[in-house]
Amino acid sequence: QVQLVESGGGLVHAGESLTLSCAASRSIRPFNVMGWYRQAPGKERESVVSASDGVPEYASFAKGRFTFSRDNAKNTMYLEMNSLKPEDTAVYYCKVRGRLCIECPNLEVWGQGTLVTVSS
């Protein structure tokens, strides 16, 4: 199994930047799908970016402002967020999906979330 722990959330002003981290308890190499999601108060969880086999696909609101990356050596993936807006306020979650071995079941694991608050 694997556990994911997000960090880096906080309170920022509009226009500022934050970088979120998602640290895994083991190697992230087996996971071919990785991504970040967010859930704003009173809204459904939505995809921010989903990277399949290393190719990220960004939600329209994230294009040009957010950047996904991963560091396999550190078992960590990141979400760099620039030009933040009040509407980016949400709890941000990381997720991985994949098999730890050829015959293992497909795993989907979520982190506990980290709160990002953007003030106007």
Image (cartoon, rainbow, N blue to C red):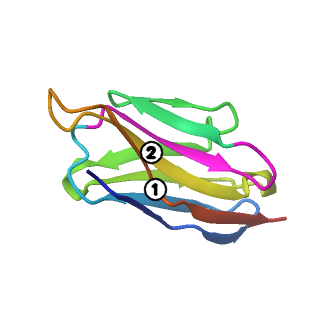
Q: Can you say whether 95 is above or below 10 in the image?
A: above
Question: Which residue, given by chain and number where applicable, does mark 1 sit on?
Answer: 111
Q: From this viewpoint, which residue is outermost toward the bottom?
A: 11
Mark 2 secondary-structure assignment: strand
Magenta span: 31-44
Q: Nearer the viewer, residue 101 or 21?
A: 101
User: Badge 2: few (under 14), some or many (20 or more) residues near its Cα, within 10 Å?
Assistant: many
Verify CB contact (< 8 Å) between mark 1 and mark 2: yes
User: x%, y% of residue 39?
Assistant: 68, 50
Find residue 114 and report its image quarter.
bottom right
Find residue 85 and report its image quarter.
bottom right
Q: Can you say whether 53 is above or below 29 in the image?
A: above
Identify the amino acid type marked 1: Gly
Q: Residue at x 14, y 27 (%)?
A: 102
Question: Which residue, given by chain and number where applicable, does mark 2 sit on?
Answer: 95
1 relative to 10 in the view: left or right:
left
- Name the image quarter holding the C terminus: bottom right
User: Badge 1: few (under 14), some or many (20 or more) residues near its Cα, within 10 Å?
Assistant: many
Mark before the other along the chain sequence, 1 or 2: 2
Q: Is residue 37 magenta?
A: yes
Q: Nearer the viewer, residue 44 or 28?
A: 44
Q: Which mark is residue 14?
A: none
Q: Residue at x 34, y 31 (%)?
A: 54
Mark 1 secondary-structure assignment: loop
Q: Residue at x 72, y 52 (%)?
A: 88
